[in-house]
Amino acid sequence: MSRRILLVTSSILGEQGQSNALAAHLQARAAERDDVTLTHRDLVAEELPHLGLEELSSWQVADEARSAAQRELAARSDALIEELQAHDVVVLGVPLYNLGIPSQMKAWFDRVMRAGRTFRYTESGPQGLVEGKRALILAARGGQYAGTELDSQTPHLKAMLGLIGITDVSLVYAEGLAMGEARREAALAEAKQAIDGLVAAL
């Protein structure tokens, strides 16, 4: 069975970004498989603006009642949601910026986390509408944060994915990348080995 991967990257450092390096490694491994197709969305090369009231309001208007400007604004979110829904696995390449996710990735989540489209409110709480998908987070950090109180990024990402219905989430950490060359090389090698195993198991 063919598997479709949506790879979403967000490092502002281009080829120097370590989360981009992990993403490129996954992309190379996926290319070795005939039964895997991969779509890459680079949120820095194709940067989304911060979500504003005018765009948010366009989602609340029925399509036939939208102005031309509202249709154009709503189409941005519609296209990203359709792209997400068309893939089986979502891979997020995520550096750690000031203990959080890059604003570029937040702008992407702001468009794909949409009430009535990817989740809905019920009497028992929100219900995700993006079903049957897996997520893989490739997290690159200069320090050592996983499992500590300073790692607010991991629960944030898992909560956002969970809200839209993606609860099968795997994480690959490359940490301590700014804590010496030997530690950096070991962390990247370990992360790439983990990626190899996850791609092989698709």
Image (cartoon, rainbow, N blue to C red):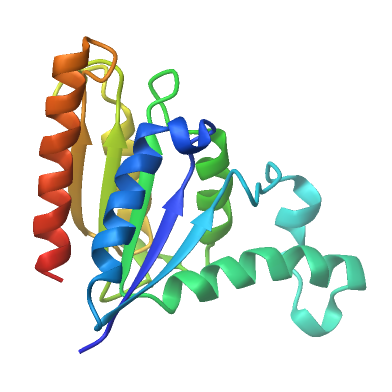
Viewer-proximal residue, 24 or 93? 24
Which residue is outermost to the bottom? 1
Residue in the image at 21% along x and 14% along y: 181
Residue in the image at 68% along x and 41% along y: 50
Residue 60 in view, yes or no: no
Residue in the image at 76% along x and 80% along y: 63
- Measured as percent of width and height from the top left, residue 160 is found at 38, 49
Residue 50 in view, yes or no: yes
Residue in the image at 57% along x and 40% along y: 104
In the image, residue 130 above or below residue 193: below
Q: How many marks?
A: 0
In the image, residue 27 above or below residue 157: below
Left or right side of 173 for 62: right
- Measured as percent of width and height from the top left, residue 178 is found at 29, 13
Which residue is outermost to the right? 68
Viewer-proximal residue, 151 or 196? 196
In the image, residue 140 above or below residue 6: above
- Measured as percent of width and height from the top left, residue 161 is found at 34, 54
Left or right side of 23 for 183: left
The quadrant the N terminus occupies is bottom left
Left or right side of 182 for 130: right
- Measured as percent of width and height from the top left, residue 10 is found at 49, 42
The quadrant the C terminus occupies is bottom left
